[in-house]
Amino acid sequence: MDDRSPEASSIECRNLWKIFGQRASEVLAAARGGKVSKDEALKEFGCVIGVADASFSVRKGEIFCIMGLSGSGKSTILRHVNRLIEPTAGSVHVDGQDVMSLSRKELRALRARKIGMVFQHMALWPHKTIAGNVAFGLEVQGAEKKECREAAEEALEKVGLRGWGHRYPDELSGGMQQRVGLARALAADPDILLMDEPFSALDPLIRRDLQDEFLALSRKAHKTTLFITHDLDEAMRVGHRIAVMKDGRIDQIGSPEAIVLRPETDYVARFVGSISTLKYLSASEIASAGNVDADAPGIGPDATLPVLIRQLANGADHLAVKDGDRLIGRIGQPEILAAVGRDLERR
Amino acid sequence: MDQFLNPFDHFNVPFGVWAERALEWIVGHSRSTLLAAKVPVQSFLEFVQGSLEAIPPLVGIIAMAVIGYILEGWRLALTGLVCLTLIGLMGTWQYAMTTLSIVIAAVTICVVFGLPIGILAARSDRFFRVLRPVLDLMQTIPSFVYLVPVVMLFGIGDTPGVIVTCFFAISPLIRLTNLGIREVREDLVEAARAFGASEARTLFGTQLPLARPSILAGLNQTVLLSLSMAVVASMISVAGLGRIVLEGIGRLDFGSATVGGLGIVLTAITVDRYVQALGAARSRTRMGA
């Protein structure tokens, strides 16, 4: 599952460190030797540890969420991918290419053509029209006016803002502005999207709409996405995999199910504590060993709780959970109740 | 005992002598450089003055009224019309044009130097740390104190008048350019970089346009300071409205001093209104949320 070679992944960060401050190299040496906490680094060296030894890879077409509270270093990691921030140590590869080895010109081309970025507070330029904002990346790469205009129109159409190109950002609502932000990131048809808490400044309802639209777009366009959020629900909805960060370190990387059902550290456990596991439980995790009637309806190991309940509601006494021909166990009302009970106790 | 209680009667630092020697040394060693520096200023001033004086008063007044109408509307057009007509009626048209050309020359030079210095200050904290006390000093020194070194270095007349006006008036432009660029929202600048803009592109395409309201406010202050200095500089034999006042005071000629003073006020009102309208007109073409 976790492929470590840079070629197979779209974004690859290896042992990334970012320490802000004059004495970064000293902190780095100390931190590599033994553990230096965030407070110690600040007190003894006057340095802030932004990112500590972070490694992860994002596969092509995957939506990879980095989740953490503010100050956990998630936005700092994001900015290493297009080298808005230079790492103190470690490497960042984008499509197998070391971004630290790029010349200024190559880096600008990478930013304009290959990576689209969406910002927390939209960051639309107020002195440019919507179309001017959207086509900016192409424009700085010297694209023809016609190409810019067409790309802007196409991108605006994708986010449902066709015909708004001649307006200015302050004529749009927050939700519409962030659609423009998304269109701007999509305009050059980049392979990679970097999204820095893109929906967190929006109202809950609009946030949900935009999440859905983004997911729909993403399924179609299949873009590799690094998605930063502090909102666990959002991470669960959006991410194929989630990395949980604390104090610059990545505590755990895994699928939403894995994060909720099998937290590896106390911090992650606390973080996901408020989330109901019921949505993520699969048949194989609910099933118990026991007698299975020969005529019990069969069900796959990945079936979710609502599916199981629906099946049982059809009148069967219990279900036989099977992985192919292999029998895993049975699920009847006692098993369902036990799963619900465990979830309630957990919280 | 007296020595202790009144030490300054007995001990003095001969600061005046030192300053004189230092100035003599500078003048002695760089006379040719200073004179060479004067040449472009002088020819630019002569060009501006020649252009302004070539305009017949009636044409000038009508043109200003039209510009005022375009920039803002009837009110500004009327202000320009009334002020300039009064200046003409008082017989101070030529003098006002002279003062105005000194102001225009000085402001142009301020922009040529002040804008790049302000940009540099915004981009380099170290440079700004060095620059800030210099700017503070320049704004603290009373206007006519500038006259002394400028006379020593550049002599008297209109050209040194432009130079001294520049020194006096440039700091707000530098300050507000620096401030304006620094206050541009960080993420707007970052977004420009994130979409592949070069440093130059980020500066000219994002930072400067967004800093424009602040820069224009600085420009407005620079223009008004220039006008006040162009008047004070009459003490070093600069022609124009200031000289009418100075001569009037010298001869206790209350009438001509009043005429000169009124001319200055009318010119100042006109210049201020028009520069402000210029800034507002620019910002109406969408300057930011």
Image (tube, coloured by chain):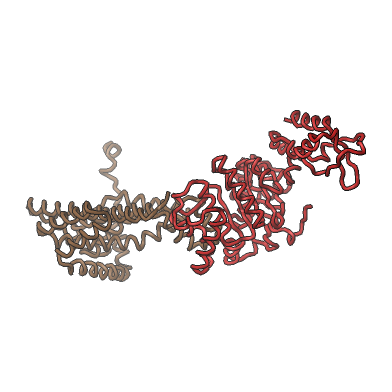
Chain colours: A red, B brown
Is residue A40 visible in the rendered image? The answer is: no
Where is residue B149, by image quadrant?
Answer: bottom left
Report the number of discs.
Answer: 0
Kindly identify the residue that appears in the image at 32 percent across and 55 percent down: B281
Q: Nearer the viewer, residue B178 or A138?
A: A138
Residue B207 or residue A29, whichever sits in front? B207
Image location (x, y in percent) of residue B269: 21, 52
Please, which residue is most extreme toward the front here?
A315
From the viewer's perspective, tell me whether residue A77 is left or right of residue A126.
Answer: right
Q: Is residue A345 above or below residue B159?
A: above
Query: Residue A217: image x %, image y %?
Result: 62, 53
Depth check: B274 or A88 in front? B274
Query: What residue sits 50% from the left and 46% below the top?
Result: A174
x and y percentages locating residue B220 in the rendered image: 30, 53
Residue placed at 61% from the left, 57% from the top?
A: A82
Using residue A111 as the reference point, say whether residue B223 is left or right of it: left
> Is residue A224 depicted above or below A303 in this figure?
below
Q: Which is nearer the eye, B246 or A111?
A: A111
Q: Residue A275, can we see it?
A: yes
Tell me the quarter of the picture where residue A311 sits: top right
> Picture coordinates of residue A140 (x, y %)?
51, 64
Asked if residue B6 is positioned above or below residue B148 in the image, the reply reads above
On the rendered image, what quadrant is the C terminus of chain A found in? top right
- As drawn, is A42 to the left or to the right of B45? right
